[in-house]
Amino acid sequence: MILLIISSIAHIDEHLQNKLRNDFPENQFLFFSHPKEIESDVDALERTEILIAYGDGVSPEVLDVMPNLKWVHVLSSGLNLLPKAKLKSKETIVTNVKGIHAIPMSEYTISMILNIVRRNYHFFQLQQKNEWESWVTVEEAYGKTLGIIGLGTVGMDIAKKAKVFGMNIMGMCNQSQPVCEYVDEVVPKENMEYLLRNSDFVLLTVPLTSDTFHLIDINELNMMKKSAYIMNISRGNVINEEALIQVLKEKRIAGAVLDVFSSEPLPSDHPIWELDNVMVTPHAAGRTPFYMERSLDIFTTNLEIYPNESKMVNVIDLDKGY
């Protein structure tokens, strides 16, 4: 029998708990609603082989009292909160839920692009003032270029949906990328300037690592078209926010769609709130009522294979951070 601890600040419905127990009756599951609850159960920690938690539920202190821990399944795509060096030293398998955000994030991205080109928000503002402006100029997504920085599962799904609207798709990744029918042109990281200069929408879907911290800074922003928009659905620190605010204030680019920020929740006195060319959403691009179900589907797929790490999905390279 393997003892598994599932610690989640997100509610795991009783039917999902029962499904895990019924599908894997030979294993014992313990459910905790908060990481702090685990710390008091030293006996369980010492016997646990598999831990399922958000990144903030895997502290170095907790790992120190888990001598039998072999595998951590993280209930998020982002891994910047994980003590990666500690996990590597313990030779712990780490997996995440990469891919489950593809549907909600692609829908979010397409809805924002359409909102911008069709000026739906502008019309909604007019509605609040009982004003009718039939001469407002609108555009089309058709024929515009979407530059996707990060061609993972999310980036690919966005490319697929954007292609339906007749957009030109350019993608950038830092590794060899298989040919994809939805991406018209793939550029390596060293050619990012080409993507920035030729895109009408620049979309960030990369993980936050030492290589992607402030990947987009003042120089990169100045490479963009004055008519272009930047969209960030990855992590706030992938963009230098101070540089972005400066560029937006001076209207050097048309605008931004921001779902993530360097500090969250975004402080009420943050200057981003005052900008009239920014759409702000509260880290909502990946939200879906199916989040936990899909997260646990990945976990159960791996549990059926465990401990054969070579066949498990979403195994993290702790050196790279993704």
Image (cartoon, helix red, strand yellow):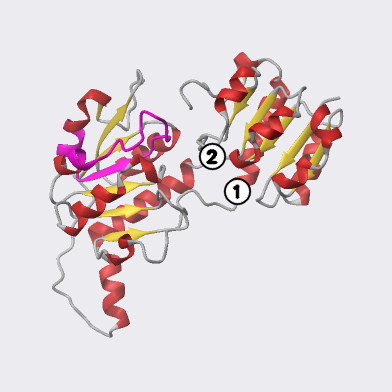
- Seen from the viewer's position, the closer of residues 37 and 50 is 37
What's the residue at 30%, 79% (across, down)?
Answer: 127
Q: Are there few (<14), some (14-19), or many (20+) residues within 10 Å of tag 2?
A: many
Residue 290 has which mark?
1
Question: Please, is residue 295 above or below residue 124 in the view?
Answer: above
Q: Is residue 219 magenta?
A: yes
Question: Please, is residue 139 above or below residue 150 in the view?
Answer: below
Please state the horizontal and vertical placement of residue 139, each as a whole percent of the image: 18, 57
What's the residue at 76%, 41% (across, down)?
Answer: 39
Residue type of the residue flagged with mark 2: Ile
Please state the horizontal and vertical placement of residue 123, each as a whole percent of the image: 27, 72
Residue type of the residue flagged with mark 1: Phe
What secondary structure is found at the residue carrying circle 1? loop
Residue 100 has which mark?
2
What's the residue at 36%, 55% (across, down)?
Answer: 111
- C-beta proximity under 8 Å, tags 1 and 2: yes
Q: Is residue 109 left or right of residue 58?
A: left
Residue 220 has which mark?
none
